[in-house]
Amino acid sequence: MGRRVKNTNLDTRTARLKLKPRPKPYWSAVERGLHLGYRRPGQPIGGAWIVRHYLGGEKYDEEGIGVADDYTDADGIACLDFWQAQAKARERWKARALAGSESAPYTVAAAIADYLVHIEHEGKSVRDAKARLDAHVLPPLGHIEMSALTTDVLRRWLKALAAAAARKRTKRGAEQAYKDAPEGDDMRKRRATANRIFAALRAALNLAHNEGKAPNADVWRRVKPFPNASGTRVRYLTEAEASRLLNACALDFRDIVRAGLETGARYSELGRLRVEDFNPDTGTLAIRESKSGKPRHIVLTNEGRAFFEQICAGRGCNDVMLPRANGAPWGTSHQLRPIAEACKRARISPPITFHELRHTWASLAVMNGVPLLVAAKNLGHADTRMIEKHYGHLAQSYITDEIRKGGPQFGAVEPTNVQFLK
C-alpha cells in the first residue's frame, strides 16, 4: 500500500466545507504525475473527487472517481473519504498503466468514452450527450467497474438526480449556479431531465454489453425511468402571435426568426446555412448537418420560397444565408437575448424560446392537415413517433376527415322509426 499523503485542506470534511465553491478542483499531489482533486459544489451536496493523470507534453486527463463524504458517511464505493479517494486514485493510476491488457478494469467512464466514439463514428452529434454524461454521470458513477455496477446504485443515482436543483447557464470559469429546489411541475421537469440523462447512460451501457464488455445487462434494465414525467403539451404561437413577434424583432434577427417559422428547422441548422443551400427551382432548403447526423431537404410553402428567394437574391453561393448585422453567422446562445426582447415588445406571455418556433411550424402544419409522416420528414425525424407524441392530438380533425372519406363502406343502413335520444 502506498504511503498516505496528507493535505490539511482536503483530508477532513470540516476542512473541505470551509473551501470556497468553484468549478476548478482543489488539487493534491499523490504520486509523480498523479493528482487527487476535490471539486466544491455551490449547493449543499457532497463534492466530487477527481483524479488527474499526466500524459506528457503538458497534457492531463481527468476522471471522476466518486462523491466526497461531506454529508454522507463514506461507504468505500460510491461515497469516499479523503483516504479512500487517495487509494482509488492509485488504483486508477495502476489500471491505466495496464491499459491494453486483459487485466485492466472496464469502468462506466470507459463505457461512456466508447459510446461517444461510436455515435460520432456514425455521424451523429456528440455534444449534447457528452455534456449530460460529463456533468451528471461521470462524477458519481464513472469510477465504478462494470462488473461491480448494481441496480441499487443506479436507482439511488437516478432518484438523487431528479431531486437535485437544476443547473443555471453559467459563464465559463465562473462558479456553477443552480435554480431553486424543484417543486410542483418543476419536479416533473426534473424527472423528465433525469430520464433523458438515464437514456443516454443506458445506451452507453447497452453498447458495452453488446460488445461483451459488460456481463449483466439486467443490472440497468431493471431500473425504470420515472413514469408520467414527459408532458406532451408544447408551446406554440398562433399565426397572429407569430406576426407580432416578427414585427418586434431587430432587422437582422427578423430574418432568422422568419426562417425558423417557415421551415421548423433548429436554430443551429439555420445558423449554418449558406446561400447555395436554397434551391429556388424545387423550393427546398438543404440541411447538410443535422442533430441526427443525416442530411435532409425541407420543402417550403410558396410564401417560404418567396422569402428565401428574396434574402438570397444577388448573393454569392458560399455567403452566410442568415448573417447577423456585423456579417458573422448566428452562433451558440446569440439568440437568447434577442428572442426574449422581441417577446417582451410583442407582449407574448409566457415568452417563447427560439426552439418553440419549430413547435409552431409543426403544430400549425398538423392542424392545417399536413399528414404526420410528411411533417416528421420535414422536421428530420426518422418516423412519426416523436411528432405523434407532441402534436398528434392536434391532428384529430384531419384523422376524422380521412377516416370518413376513406374508411370501409358496408352499404346504407336500413331506415327505422327508432330515434336516438339526445
Image (cartoon, rainbow, N blue to C red):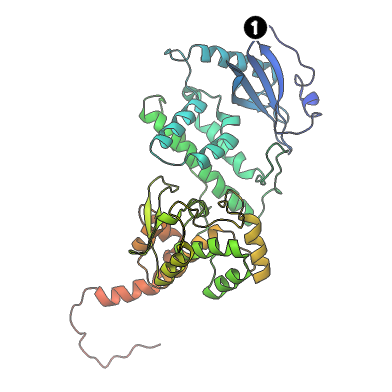
Looking at the rendered structure, the kind of residue marked 1 is: Gly
Q: Nearer the viewer, residue 52 or 300?
A: 300
Q: Position of residue 75 (x, y in %)?
A: 64, 23
From where the camera sits, is residue 297 visible?
Answer: yes
Around disc 1, counting alpha carbons within 10 Å, would you say few (fewer than 14), some (14 to 19), or many (20 or more)? Answer: few
User: Please, which residue is most extreme toward the bottom here?
Assistant: 417
Q: Which residue is disc 1 drawn over? A: 2
Q: Position of residue 132 (x, y in %)?
A: 55, 39
Q: Quadrant location of residue 252?
A: bottom right
Q: Residue at x 57, y 72 (%)?
A: 241
Q: Position of residue 372 (x, y in %)?
A: 37, 63
**Quadrant where the N terminus is found in the figure:** top right
Position of 143 relative to 259 (above/below): above
Q: Residue at x 67, y 39 (%)?
A: 172
Q: Position of residue 125 (x, y in %)?
A: 46, 41
Tag count: 1
From where the camera sits, is residue 234 visible?
Answer: no
**Quadrant where the C terminus is found in the figure:** bottom left
Q: Nearer the viewer, residue 303 or 195?
A: 303
Label 1 secondary element: loop
Q: Nearer the viewer, residue 333 or 390?
A: 333
Q: Nearer the viewer, residue 200 or 150?
A: 200
Position of 93 relative to 267 (above/below): above
- Left or right of residue 216, residue 332 in this image: right
Q: Residue at x 25, y 73 (%)?
A: 407
User: Please, which residue is most extreme toward the left here?
Assistant: 411
